[in-house]
Amino acid sequence: MSLKIRRGLIKSVLVTAGPTRERIDPVRFISNYSTGTFGYEIAREARARGCAVTLVSGPAHLKPPAGVKFVAVETAEEMKRAVLKNKADCVIMAAAVCDWRIKNPSDTKIKKDGKRRLLELAENPDILKELGRKKRGVLVGFALETGELEKNALKKLKEKNLDIIVANRLGKEKKLFGSNAIDIFILDHKGEREYHRNKDKAELAKIILDKVLNVNI
């Protein structure tokens, strides 16, 4: 049986934002360049539309939007626990979760000793895929690609059982991290495609929420 999600029927939204960090030792970590801005704008817009919003954020130098429940996390595993225990009507996974973590982080600061060091990596949990397996409402994923944008977005949408995917391309000509005006490609499970070019993240948050609040699942 399909459920028609119409404007106003999604009462609760969970948004993830920012990067995650994976510890190497007590003073070093691996991460990525995500600022969290896009996720924070989406959370702000969802709250402005009257939804109960939970924002699960990795480390970001941003002030949480007023009126949202804010959950600060650091690692991918912490984000997974925070997301999976939430029962929101809609989950929007805008965070840039590290795919890898250090397999055996050091409990003490690693000192230089002139020797070559190898860091062994282990895969982090695929939070989006797990959400897709247990899906109970609208699920929105994000994808950052360096090539074949539409092909890779479609593959991820199907593999992760998403309703909507928001994708953008990282290229030499376009700065994404820390830039407010970006291009995005939106694809939904019905095959509808949209391109939005050179729009700021606050405006794109409105476009994404318009799409989310009118999706059929």
Image: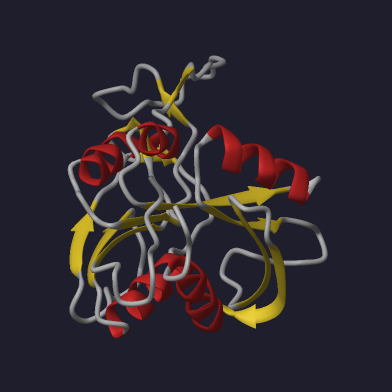
Going 37% across and 55% down the picture, which residue do you hit?
A: 3
Going 38% across and 37% down the picture, which residue do you hit?
A: 127
Along the viewing direction, whichever of 33 and 95 lies nearer the viewer? 95
List x then y, in percent, for residue 38.
48, 69
Number of numbered discs: 0
Going 39% across and 26% down the picture, which residue do you hit?
A: 111
Q: For the N terminus, give its image quadrant.
A: top left
Instruction: Look at the picture and state if 74 lies above or below 40.
Output: above
Image position of 12 (left or right of 5): left
Along the viewing direction, whichever of 130 and 32 lies nearer the viewer? 130
Going 34% across and 78% down the picture, which residue do you hit?
A: 44
Along the viewing direction, whichever of 20 and 169 lies nearer the viewer? 169
Image position of 209 (left or right of 116): left
Instruction: Classify residue 135 by image quadrant.
Output: top left
List x then y, in percent, for residue 20.
39, 46
Question: Which colour scheme appears in the figure?
Answer: secondary structure
List x then y, in percent, for residue 214.
46, 70
Image position of 22 (left or right of 143): left
List x then y, in percent, for residue 144.
63, 51
Instruction: Classify residue 90 by image quadrant.
Output: bottom left
